Each structure stands twice: as C-alpha cells, then as structure tokens.
Amino acid sequence: MCGIVGYVGPQRAQDVVVDGLRRLEYRGYDSAGVAVVHDGVLAVAKRSGKLANLEKVLADKPLPPATTGIGHTRWATHGPPNDANAHPHTGGARRVALVHNGIIENYAELRDRIEADDHVFLSETDTEIAAHLVELQVQSGVDLQVAMQRVCQQLDGAFTLVAVDAEDPGRVVAARRNSPLVVGLGEGENFLGSDVAAFIEHTREALELGQDQIVTITADEVTVTDFWGSPVEPTRFHVDWDLSAAEKDGHDWFMRKEIFEQPRAVADSLIGRRGVNGLLQLDEMRLADEEIRDLDKIIVIACGTSFYAGMVAKYAIEHWTRTPVEVELASEFRYRDPIVDNTTLVVAISQSGETADTLQAIRHAKSQGAKVLAICNTNGSSIPRESDAVIYTHAGPEIGVASTKGFLTQLVACYLLALYVAQVKGTRYGDEIDEIMGQLEAMPDHIDTVLTRADSIYELARAHVATRSVLFLGRHAGYPVALEGALKLKELAYIHAEGFAAGELKHGPIALIEEGLPVLCVVPPRGRDQLHAKMLGGIQEVRARGARTICLAEEGDHTIEPYADDLIRLPQVPVLLQPLVAIIPLQLFACELATALGHDVDQPRNLAKSVTVE
Ligand code: F6R
C-alpha cells in the first residue's frame, strides 16, 4: 500500500521518479506526488486521483531540472484522497519534503505538541507531522540522517519515510519500520523504492533493509544505520527478472498477461526440485529434518487469495503427511490466543511478503516459540526475512492487483512442502512422491490447454454483463477454488459473488437460488469416493430451483452434461492438483467480465496490492 520512490544521480529526477511511480501505481492510486530539490529550493507537484492526473500537471508545468527527488503514490488511510492529503508533505518552512507509507499511530499526540508552537498543518494526514518534525531537527543544525533518526525514535506504528532537505541537495534519507523499502544500486546513481519494480529499468542490483533502519543515498554512496546511528551491513541481492517482466507485453491488462504467464510460472516454481539422488529437495528451506520429524502440527496463516492457497495446502499436507493442519486468517490469528509451541510449524503464505496482518501473525507465532516457514514471491521483503525458513515461488513480478500467477505458484510451493514433509517423515514412499512430482510437472501443459479455451470463456463472461450476483460451488480442493473464483469476481467486476462448500448449500444458502441465478460449479474428477456423486447431487438441487449452472468438469465426464447449462472442460488431473487448472477459467471469467463492464482490471476501486496496514 502506497508506492515510494527516491532518486539521486545525473538524470532528471522528475522523470526517474514518475517512471518509478508508474511501476508502483498498483500499490495505491488515490493520489500521486513528486518533490525535487533544485538550487536550494523544494519544488512539489501533487494531485488526487491516478498518476495520469499528476502527469498532466507536470506536462503543463514541469518541475525544475533537479537530479534529487522523491515521489509517492497513495492508498489513503488518514484523510480523504484529495490534493491536500497527497504526498509529499512539507514542513512549515518548506525546507523538508517527505513521503510516507504506513500509519503513524501517535501522530495526533505529536501534532498537539507542536501545534502549540504555531505549527500550521495543511492536511488531515498522519504523515505531515513527520515532515514538520524532521524539518525542526534540520533547522536545529543536525543533518538529515540524524534528523530522521531522532524523529523515528519518537514515532509509533508502521512507516517507511523518505525525505529530502532543500539545503542538502544530492541526498535522500529514508527510514523503515514495518513497511517495505529497498535500495537500487546504480552506477553513479542510487534509488529507493517500495519494491524493485521502482528502479528495475535502471538496475537489478539491490539492497534489502531490515527493521528500524535508516538509509542515506547520494549519487555515489549508500549508508545504512539503525535508528540510533550504529552502522548496519545490509544484504545485497540480484533481481532475477528484468524490465520486460514489468511490461504488459501487448495485453490490455497486467492481469491478463499474468494469467497467460501461469504455465511458465508453474514450471519455474518446479525447476531444480528433484535432486540427483531422486529425492525431492527444497534447498532454500533451511529447516532441519529433525525439526520436520518433530512437528506435531502445522498452522497456515495468510490473507485473501493466499489464504485460499493455504486451504488447499491443508488438504495436501494432511493427506500426504498425516500431520494435522489448521488454516487461519492472519488477521485473526494473534487475537485468539492460538496454541502454538516449538513443535508447531507456522507456514506464512504471502505473494508480496509485506502484508501487515501476516507479518504481525508471524511475530506472534515466533514469540510463542514456533518455527515459521514463509512461502513468498518477493525477494528482499519482510516476511521471508523475519521467518526461519522460506520457499520462494517463482512467479516473477505480479503487478495486477488481483493475484493470479501468485496463487498458482503458491499452490505449487504448498504441494512441494507437503511432499517434502512426507519424504522426511516417511509417510509416503519415494515412488509415490515421484509419481506426484510427475503429475505436477505435467501441470504447465494442462494449464496451457485450459488457456487455449479462453475465447469461449470470454464469450460466456460477456453474456453476464447484466448479472448482479453469482454463486460458486466446490467440494474438497474445489471449495477453495470456489472461494477464490468468487473473490476474483467481487474485486474486479464489483458483482456480488459468494463461494460455498457445495454440501453447505442445503444448510441455508440455497435460499438465495432464484430463477436464472448463475452458479459456477467446480466438479471434482470422477472416481474419488463419493465426492463426484455428491457434487452432482448439489448441482441438481440448485438447478431444480432455477439456477443456471456453469460447470467446470474434466474431459470425458459425461455424467455432468444433463445438468450443465454451460460446460467448461478441464484436463484430467488428480483431485488434489485440480485447483491448478480449475481456477484458470474463473480468473479469465472475472477479467473479461470486468473488462466488459468498463472497469480498470489492474487497479480495482478501493484496493491496492501489498496491504501494509493492519
Ligand atoms: C486478491 C488478492 C489479495 C491478496 C492478499 C494477501 O486477488 O490479491 O486477497 O491475496 O491481500 O496478499 P499477499 O499474498 O501479498 O500477502
């Protein structure tokens, strides 16, 4: 939430900062702003609404040709999304400009304290106080880095702050606590960004910053300290994707591009997992076999789409390892006094690695003695850094706000984790693990097959532009798919959509069924206990009450034909792996319906990617 950019170097700062903001806009699009330092004076431009509004202002009236600048794209927390609340904010003397991501919890108290000294505030934000406080510090004679340290010591809450001082050109100082910030290392230029997308067109060399650290960049130098001024050695990393991954590549939306990237993303997440000895290997995981053998319980914590991946993980881990698994919304976890100890493995799933609810849940789990394993897509982000172990997914940058390839690669990581635990605990024979790995390795081709049917799914979606409500039904591993399909439709098409476990319908929700209501049904593969038959029963019940059924069923399943008003065929895969193919039509459906309704698919209203506030 909120994108932040900082730059010092030979290029025109306005251009570098605005380009960076364009790549970070998915983090928030309530307003955008930029500040540069030129000839000892600050120049600031900001506008409510999307970045395009700011770009128009800058096209009419460019900022001076400065080479030091900061910028911000906002997801509003304190104060509505208007021009006054847009960042950057300045101190009263307009010597310091500052941008912020997060929430300063004690801002009101700090503001009352200095308002008594005739400080006038121009916005309703929690951020402006930080600009005033930093400015007061530099006015007292300390440099910007020390000023930032002293101010951070007074702040409570979550914040990335990035500031410039008009009287100290050529330097940008930033601080981070509980909000993301990475440094891009250029040749004779350096960058700051909420994530590496901000500077990927300039450099792929980066530094990750830890909790409570302050970084100063000049064109030639980067120095990092803690909030008390002690030097810190940051961790350097290389970004393994390039600018082309952050472009739409001919698609109308990033989301659509990312949907079509899924065969590759799944294949990449599987690369290198089979060792020379034929055993499954998860090199980066850093959990000892004894620790895995001693596990009594696994708790998966996550939010939103990642939570639904966690639900699938439960089915797979329990089935293959016989280890009990709980799945919990990260935002609820620490508030219910969970039973966690050193025989519990907490698995935190997060695409961004920055979700505040998940991060806080991790901290709680660790304080209770649990080991934490992160499943994450973002190198250098907080969640893997604060976890004991990590499995990285290899989706590449996910820019569409609605998660797609992030979800699929999380599923793959969950399957790999389940198989690895089974291997270590000996709950599955090697040849069984080998067989499942083979089935996973066939998935990119199966996903590709579903994608070749996109046009018929689009046609179906466009036929639903007048629909105001859609239900999704699933059972077993198809239930999380139903929930995820409904979430996609809600967040993109703004249509009421609900996912249900098909067996639950008769306990209440069936009252919602009325003539013509579209019901999307994820039909499990045949041949598994009573699952398929029970699902068929549920479909008949809703159809008998007037619902229009759109069924997702495997090739060759003719039993479904009499009960499906529309039928989308899925490749034949095992039930536990079916989410990898079944979610694809639902992603395509939501994307196309939202497009037909004229919505901005990549930037749905009220949302932002990477939810860094609790
Ligand atoms: C929905 C979506 C969100 C995220 C959720 C968790 O399409 O993207 O529900 O899944 O905010 O985000 P991460 O995985 O970054 O922790």
Image (cartoon, rainbow, N blue to C red):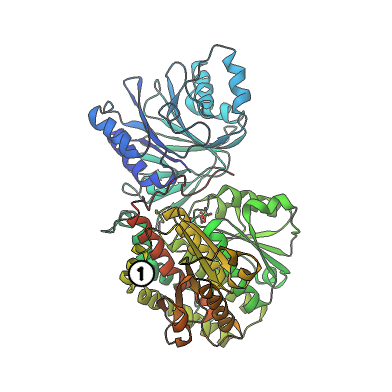
Observer-nearest residue: 419 or 278? 419
Q: Which residue is mark 1?
A: 457
Q: Is residue 45 left or right of residue 233?
A: left
Determine the residue positioned at 46% across, 55% down: 495
Observer-nearest residue: 567 or 78? 567
x%, y% of residue 14? 30, 33
Determine the residue positioned at 63% across, 51% down: 331
Query: Against 151, is 336 above or below?
Result: below
Query: Against 71, is 410 above or below?
Result: below
Q: Residues within 10 Å of mark 1 (few under 14, many from 20)?
A: many
Query: Against 602, is 225 above or below?
Result: above
Q: Quadrant of residue 261?
A: bottom left
x%, y% of residue 585? 41, 69
Q: Secondary structure at mark 1?
A: helix
x%, y% of residue 499? 54, 64
Q: Is residue 14 left or right of residue 514?
A: left
Q: Amino acid at mark 1?
A: Ile
Q: How many marks?
A: 1
Q: Quadrant of residue 241?
A: bottom left
x%, y% of residue 92? 47, 17
Note whether ligand 1 is within 8 Å of mark 1.
no
